[in-house]
Amino acid sequence: MNFYFFFTLLAIILPTLIELVSDILNSRRAAAQLPGEFKGIYPEEKYTQSQNYLKETTGCGLLEMAFFMLLNIAFLALGGYNAWDMVCRKICVNDLTAGLLFIAGIGLAQKILSLPFSVYRTFALEAKYGFNRTTVGTFIADQGKTFFLSVLIGGPVLALVLWLLQSLGTLAWLYAWLSMIVIQTVIMFLAPALIMPLFNRFVPLEAGELKTAIEDLAKQQKFDLSGIYQMDGSKRSAKANAFFTGFGRHRRIALFDTLIKQLTVPEIVAVLAHEIGHFKKRHIWKNMAFSILASGLMFYLLNFVIFNFELFYGLGMRHISVYAGLVFFSLLFGPLKMLLDAAGNVLSRRQEYEADRFAIDSGADREVFITALKKLTVNHLGNLTPHPLKIILDYSHPPILERIQALRRL
């Protein structure tokens, strides 16, 4: 076994094993006794249900991670990448089209193989615990729309990146990185108007107490809005959420219809005050800067992989190519991606505390806000006692009990 093959195996196995250990520890740490903070709001029967939900979702995730880890190892060890590359080279007239076919074929295979897990998670697991509202027709339509967007948007973007990396020499990574920054920014502006409506229906929120309260909050905080919308989140799930889209005067609020049903008007306003806090504290821009720097590091390191003859030879490839280099880099980047994600989560959790403080400082009632957070946790069968390793790896929000304690100290 040569060094590059061993190193690639390690890069595949290590992050998956860490995630597996994290999920197992997290599942085992679930407290059998309901924490006192939630007594009276989290029925004992529902709390037991939440622990069963955690164990079953964890089990499904563990199975999926282990399956794809073993699949990647087997495909690599059996020379699958080289065999597929030879097929693509025979079919296509040049490296660019061969690269598109090579990456598209791998992506499509992964999508097809992940479908059974998605079907089980949606129609068995989520349905068992009362969350699923997705019909078979909606599920199929979502898959079709996602595939259509992948071809319509992902295809040209991938072609551009491949062309840049193949044509512009040692600084190609820099041009590819700058191009991706522009493309991602454009998509962020276009998504609310062109992409999101493909999946959900957005209707202006009807005049009434809730709309008036939200408009008053926006005026008080001098927060420009182009509209307040209700989204048919119940079309797919009983879980509730709310989010902002757009920038500047084009900002919109989208409220899941499930959120409107589950929370009172003051509770929704408190949640939105928290969301406004993210804008006022410039968290959106800070997260964009972090993402841009992380992608810049990725493209810079990619430059050392895509033309590494020894790597390609070690992984059993007969030809060196930019497109295969991209795929191999995605395997090698796993451990560093895990570290970057963990760093991003640290930043995000800190921002959540800052946005909570902003909500209280802006006039939101502390107890009303806490009650809203509790209701959302209960309705989502949230885990009240996550393991520290799970928090480090996957939690973009602070654990709910720690968040409530921090709110009470304000």
Image (cartoon, rainbow, N blue to C red):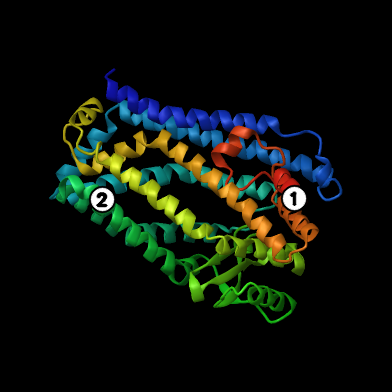
Can residue 239 be seen here? The reply is no
Q: Secondary structure at mark 2?
A: helix
Q: Which residue corresponds to mark 2?
A: 174
Q: Amino acid at mark 2?
A: Leu
Can residue 332 be seen here? The reply is yes
Residue 343: give x, y in percent of width and height.
Answer: 50, 41
Residue 65: give x, y in percent of width and height.
Answer: 49, 35
Closer to the camera, 22 or 122? 22
At horizontal 23% and vertical 33% (from top left) the residue drawn is 82
Circle 1 packing at 10 Å, graded few (<14), some (14-19), many (20+), is: some
Disc 1 versus disc 2: distance between alpha carbons?
46 Å
Closer to the camera, 306 or 124? 306
User: In this picture, is 177 found above or below 190?
Assistant: above
Residue 228: give x, y in percent of width and height.
Answer: 60, 75
Looking at the figure, which quarter contains the N terminus?
Answer: top left
User: In this picture, is 193 found above or below 207?
Assistant: above
Q: Is there CB contact under 8 Å for labels 1 and 2? A: no
Residue 354's tag is none
At horizontal 74% and vertical 49% (from top left) the residue drawn is 404
Q: Amino acid at mark 1?
A: Val
Residue 49: give x, y in percent of width and height.
Answer: 75, 42
* Earlier sequence position, callout 1 versus callout 2: 2
Residue pushed farthest right?
40
Q: Secondary structure at mark 1?
A: helix
At horizontal 41% and vertical 36% (from top left) the residue drawn is 336
Q: Which residue corresponds to mark 1?
A: 378
